[in-house]
Image (cartoon, rainbow, N blue to C red):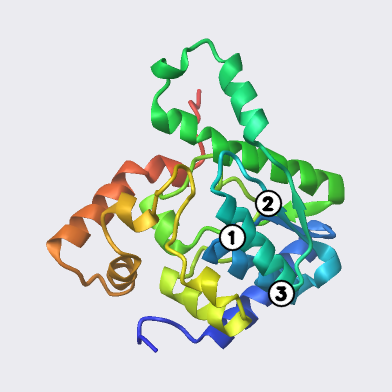
Amino acid sequence: MNSIYRDPIYLKERIVAWIRERVKDAGAKGVVFGLSGGLDSSVLALLAKEALGYNNILGVIMPCESQSEDADFALMLAENCSVPVRQVDLTPVYHAFLDALPFKRDDMRFLAMANIKPRLRMTTLYFFAQNCDFLVCGASNRDELELGYFTKYGDSGADMLPMGDLLKGEVRLLAGHLGVPAPIISRSPSAGLWPGQTDEGELGVTYDEIDLFLATGEGDERVREIVERARKRSEHKRKMPPICKI
């Protein structure tokens, strides 16, 4: 095991206890989370199940112009690991929203359109949460949070982030320990916002390089520049909106 990573058994025990405590303190019945078919949401699902049991968790599969394999992998996790799920196809909602805007499609910036998708998913999760007396669990890890690799008020919109202190490699170790199916563990990390998109391709740096830099400060100048530039550019995402105090 890489020395920068903590023991997955210890991590599981701490996070499971933390989830239970947060749900109890909030007076909630359980948690709801998006299930994308990726590594992070799969690990989150199994941590939540370990903490609260089958009847007090819900994974929501929310395709939105998504690759069909995303839902296939999410259902694989649900079936193989006995996780309750519901499916909500947000594709028609997404297109109806775009049609309602006072712009032609050709005049819409690509990222402005793409970021609607995680914000629709956030809204959907909060509906389930309020309808079921659940809390919304987000699946962001430390790498994503530090570099701002998330959509503001989208996948960052959650009541708790159980894995927010975990390096990506620690999430992968937990996946193996918890029994996440191997095809999910081996998938290339992707936010799924457009065909062929991968996290590492978009970031320009590998998660292993990010992990090492965040854990030790070690890395070549290219990695340092990418991480520090991303941190600076995304600082506003990690703060509450500023208030003009009179």
Q: Earlier in the sequence, mark 1 or mark 2?
A: 1
Label 1, label 3: how far apart the Cα atoms are: 13 Å
The reply to whether callout 1 and callout 2 are in contact (CB within 8 Å) is yes
Q: Residue furthest top?
A: 102
Question: Between 203 and 133, which is closer to the camera in this rendering?
Answer: 203
At a point 66% along the width and 72% down the height, the residue shown is: 47
Label 1, label 2: how far apart the Cα atoms are: 8 Å
Q: Position of residue 190 (x, y in %)?
A: 45, 55
Q: Position of residue 32 (x, y in %)?
A: 73, 55
- Tell me the element at label 2: strand
Label 2, label 3: how far apart the Cα atoms are: 15 Å
Mark 3: few, some, or many residues within 10 Å (few <14, many ≥20)? some
Q: Position of residue 242 (x, y in %)?
A: 47, 33
Q: Label 1 is placed on what type of residue? A: Gly
Instruction: Please state, as top left, top right, bottom left or bottom right, where the N terminus lies in the image.
Output: bottom left
Q: Return the residue at label 3.
A: 81
Q: Label 3 is placed on what type of residue? A: Cys
Q: Earlier in the sequence, mark 2 or mark 3?
A: 2
Label of residue 37 in the image: 1
Question: Between 13 and 1, which is closer to the camera in this rendering?
Answer: 1
Question: Between 15 and 90, which is closer to the camera in this rendering?
Answer: 90
Mark 1: few, some, or many residues within 10 Å (few <14, many ≥20)? many
Residue 18 in sight from this viewpoint: no
Q: Label 2 is placed on what type of residue? A: Ile
Q: Position of residue 88 (x, y in %)?
A: 73, 43
Q: Return the residue at label 2.
A: 61
At a point 63% along the width and 45% down the height, the residue shown is: 63
